[in-house]
Image (spheres, coloured by chain):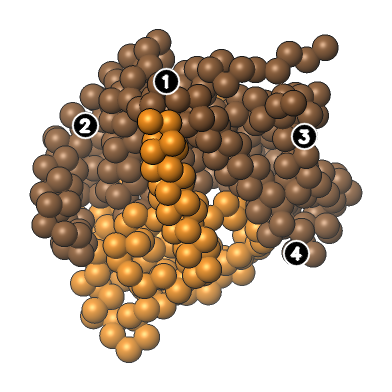
Amino acid sequence: MMTPLTGDEALWLMERVIALAALLQATELILLRRIYAPGGVWIWDMLAPEYNVFPAIARRLVSATLGYPAYLLLLLSQAFVAAYALFYSHPVLFGYLFVGTLLTSVRWRGTFNGGSDYMTLLVLGAVTVANLFPSSSLVSFACLCYVALQASASYWIAGWVKARRRNWYTGRALGGFLKSTMYESARLERLAERRSVLMIFGWLIVVFELSFPFALLDVRLAAGYLCLGILFHFSVAVVFGLNRFVLPWAACYPAIYFISGLQ
Amino acid sequence: MYTSLSVAFFILVASYLALVLLAKRCAPGHIRGRTVLLLRALFPTWRFFDDLAEVPVLLVRFRKAEGEYSPWEPCLPPLRRSAWRVLLNPEGNYQLAAQNLLCQLNDDIDLIAGEDVEALRESVSYALVENLTSFELKRRRLLLPGDLFQFKVVGRVQGGTNEADALLSAEHVL
């Protein structure tokens, strides 16, 4: 017998997982400090003119926070706040993480890591709003609904764009992606040549993504889909190096599980 | 009390959804506003791995002041997979960010290079790719200050081997 989550439990779990995601993301960027320090690649003095499109007040904010070493200090404070938010809930903590993640995306000319930045911001925004109104169960409910809706949409849209491409049914698309990862792997090269295996996995991925919204209908369905989802994201992290997708999507799962248990 | 809070919240959510829908109506290639591009993390698209595409690949060659150029080789070496990288993968994410940068340079090539190669060479994307190349050469200890290098961006369909030159850089000094 599956036990549905209460709204408070779902929100609490979401906060812990997204705090862990923010902590790991900040740690990765701290470890990468050479690439945005002077002598690196994304040097602030070169990037700064691009931000002249912002209003004066926003320009002042980005110049004060995104240069070096100010940006490194921002990331260190993000890591500290995220570690604190692993145990405590407060709108200021999650609001700070939201603003820091947005500034990081802006510093990388839009996003540092595409989809994972979208989902991290979405969940941080939702938990910040829910914490701003702790006594309103309606606001918490709306935040959980919004996260569940966007998470389901993320799978469905990704499935829909694949379903319209013949390459996904023949295995050619998956084979091509496997051959163009950042990793060196003879085993993966061999797998990318096995058309029947690629075809089966291509179909499985399309069907899984397209049917994901059914997870919202029942807790047992939700439990099954969420286990498959975790397996899917771990596989993507191992094969393609997209580790940043695991936790932001896992942070949405309590919301999906909560909605699926509504009577 | 609850009513006013709820109304305010739903207006917030509805505004955000309207912005998301508006952003979805424009294909990424058609978004011209720099502000929207810089803030695009707020407008999720959820289109991942939709089909095989031509992706930019960065190649580099180099020479000592008096020597000949080396053959072209990939600027970013392939990484070794490890279980640890599922949790923390700074090097992998650096490579993904570099790939993102090459896509931005490709967009700039489409937008401005048609008639004006000099304008492209003055763009931020070009300067950052030049930085990326020299950073990698220094990191791999292949060159000394004063040595020369050149990079080129080629388009390669994922999973394929055919390449088409998209951009050949000027000669740069490390």
Q: CA distance from mark 3 to mark 1?
A: 27 Å
Residue A74, position as x, y percentages in the image: 21, 31
Residue A146, position as x, y percentages in the image: 55, 40
Q: Which residue is mark 2?
A: A74
Q: Which residue is mark 4?
A: A164
Ranked by sequence position, the earlier of labels 4 and 3 is 4
Instruction: Please report, as a chain letter, where disc 2 is located.
Output: A
Camera sees residue A170: yes
Q: Residue at x 52, y 61 (%)?
A: B21
Which chain appears orange?
Answer: B
Q: Residue at x 65, y 17 (%)?
A: A5
Instruction: Please report, as a chain letter, where disc 1 is located.
Output: A
Mark 4 and mark 2 on one chain: yes
Q: Residues within 10 Å of mark 1 (few under 14, many from 20)?
A: few
Q: CA distance from mark 4 to mark 2?
A: 42 Å
Three-letter residue code for mark 4:
Arg
Three-letter residue code for mark 2:
Leu
Ranked by sequence position, the earlier of labels 3 and 2 is 2
Q: Residues within 10 Å of mark 2 (few under 14, many from 20)?
A: some
Q: Which residue is mark 3?
A: A217
